[in-house]
Amino acid sequence: MSLFVNSWRIIAAAWKHFSRNLWLALTTVFVLVLSLLSVNVLLGVNVLLSNAVRQLEDKIDVSVYFKSETPVAVVEQAKFFMTSLPQVKDATVVTAEKALEDFKKLHADDPKIMSALAELDQNPLGAVLIIKARQTTDYPFLLEALNNPQFDFAIESKNYDDHSDTINRVRDISRSVQVFGAVLIAVFALFSILIVFNTIRVAIYTQREEIGIMRLVGASNAFVRSPFVLEGVFLALFALGVTSVAVYSAAVYVDPRLGGMFDGANAGLVAYFTAEGWRLALIEGGVLAGLVALSSWAAVGKYLKK
């Protein structure tokens, strides 16, 4: 029963400290929110850059154009050979008929091309083999593998869309953002600890008479410390709640507006923060609450040593 009473007294005292120094507490929460926002902005930027790299990698392929008179068996043999290579992720055959249909759709508004096609007795296009590698570094090897004498005689041309330079630039930007973000997070974390430390010191100063009475009646140092430590945890949890609402709202607002950067596809921010929200909240909230609690414990300890 006494444990319950003591716990309730600690909670009530912590809330009283919080409410008495409300404006200072809100200022502290604001700084804590900035710290958490810096972490989540860094995570969001990493998600965007990762999705950009993935999209660029999806665009890379080798298109192998076969001569119009190439038998289907030769095209299928080429596909079978390429898919047997461990470096190949996928290989798709576009038949000559499908290639002609796509060509007509692409040039439907060009009467000269359409009239020229109408005059032909047969399909001028051959089949196309589209090859995707597992890694972007595998494409030079695959281009060399296409020189197989079993089917290279039937190949009219190859088209290799290489975006490796762009991918490397995006990855370099991602690494730079991570370094800058880590420094920014460290700075905000330091400021947060110092401000929480001073906030608790102010709370101790305003409650110095009550603390003196508690010590006179035999209250332990742990009991004196607990309300201030709990006040720091209150600040951390409040900041976490504000940050969670702000981050998710920002993701919902920004996500559809970034579609142009991803060819109309979803940028992935809402999906990421929805899937990882609880885990991020537990990790960020736990780390922040731990740092704030330690800072509060140290602030009270410095007073108790006097």
Image (cartoon, rainbow, N blue to C red):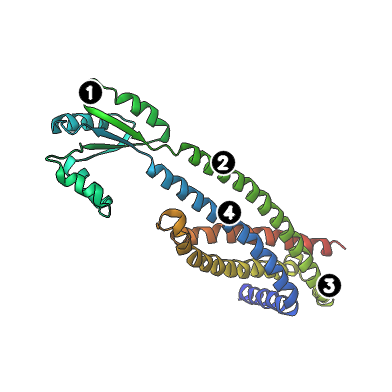
Q: Are marks 3 and 1 in contact (CB under 8 Å)?
A: no
Characterize the local packing of mark 1: few (<14), some (14-19) or many (20 or more) Cα atoms within 10 angstroms.
few
| The N terminus: image quadrant | bottom right
131 or 276: nearer the viewer: 131
Q: Earlier in the sequence, mark 4 or mark 1?
A: 4
Q: Which mark is residue 128?
A: none
Q: Residue at x 52, y 44 (%)?
A: 170
Q: Residue at x 50, y 67 (%)?
A: 253
Which of discs 3 and 1 lies nearer the camera? The answer is 1
Quote the CA–CA distance across marks 1 and 2.
41 Å
Q: Amino acid at mark 2?
A: Asp
Which residue in the structure is indicated by mark 4? 42
Q: As displayed, is residue 12 above or below residue 116? A: below
Q: Are marks 4 and 3 in contact (CB under 8 Å)?
A: no
157 or 205: nearer the viewer: 157
What percent of the width, then of the height, locates residue 159? 34, 35
Q: Are marks 4 and 1 in contact (CB under 8 Å)?
A: no
Q: Which quadrant of the view contains residue 275? A: bottom left
Characterize the local packing of mark 2: few (<14), some (14-19) or many (20 or more) Cα atoms within 10 angstroms.
few
| The C terminus: image quadrant | bottom right
Q: Is residue 204 left or right of residue 95?
A: right
Q: Which quadrant of the view contains residue 121? A: top left
Q: Secondary structure at mark 1?
A: helix
Q: Which residue extends farthest right?
A: 306
Q: Earlier in the sequence, mark 4 or mark 3?
A: 4
Q: Earlier in the sequence, mark 1 or mark 2?
A: 1
Which residue in the structure is indicated by mark 1? 153
